[in-house]
Image: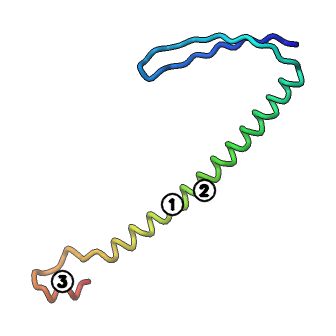
Amino acid sequence: MEKQEIKVTELKENGAVIEETMTYEKNIDQLKNEVRDLEYRKQSLYEQMVAMRKMYKGYEEKQKTLKDVIAKLEPKTETSGTVDDIFENL
């Protein structure tokens, strides 16, 4: 069994800093399993981040396309003052 001591520092919303020291014992197999689990979670989070980035890029492209469509549909401001001229530019 290995004895481990971990110091955790937490910053609260009100600005308070709390430091806590935890001591626990685990055997080597448990530690190896924890490392393997953390590596799996890290890979999973990385894959989620890549997927979110692709989704964000897709949203950016859709937003640009919608802005282009809106720009084409908006009436031109360089029209003369008659109603007939305004409807011709739509």
Identify residue for label 1.
59
The residue at 83%/17% (across/down) is 26
Instruction: Say what amino acid the circle numbered 1 marks.
Output: Tyr
Identify residue for label 3.
86
Mark 2 or mark 3, earlier in chain: 2
- Mark 1 → mark 2, Cα distance in angstroms: 9 Å
Q: x and y percent of residue 47 in the render? A: 69, 48
For residue 25, side relative to residue 84 (left or right): right
Q: Is mark 1 on a helix, strand or loop?
A: helix
Q: x and y percent of residue 90 in the render? A: 26, 83
Q: Is residue 33 above or below residue 26?
A: below
Instruction: Say what amino acid the circle numbered 2 marks.
Output: Lys
Q: Residue 54 carries which label?
A: 2
Marks 2 and 3 in Cβ contact (< 8 Å): no
Residue at the extreme left: 81
Q: In this view, does 30 lie above or below 7?
A: below
Q: x and y percent of residue 78 in the render? A: 19, 76
Near mark 3 (Cα within 10 A), the count class, few <14, some 14-19 or many ≥20, is some
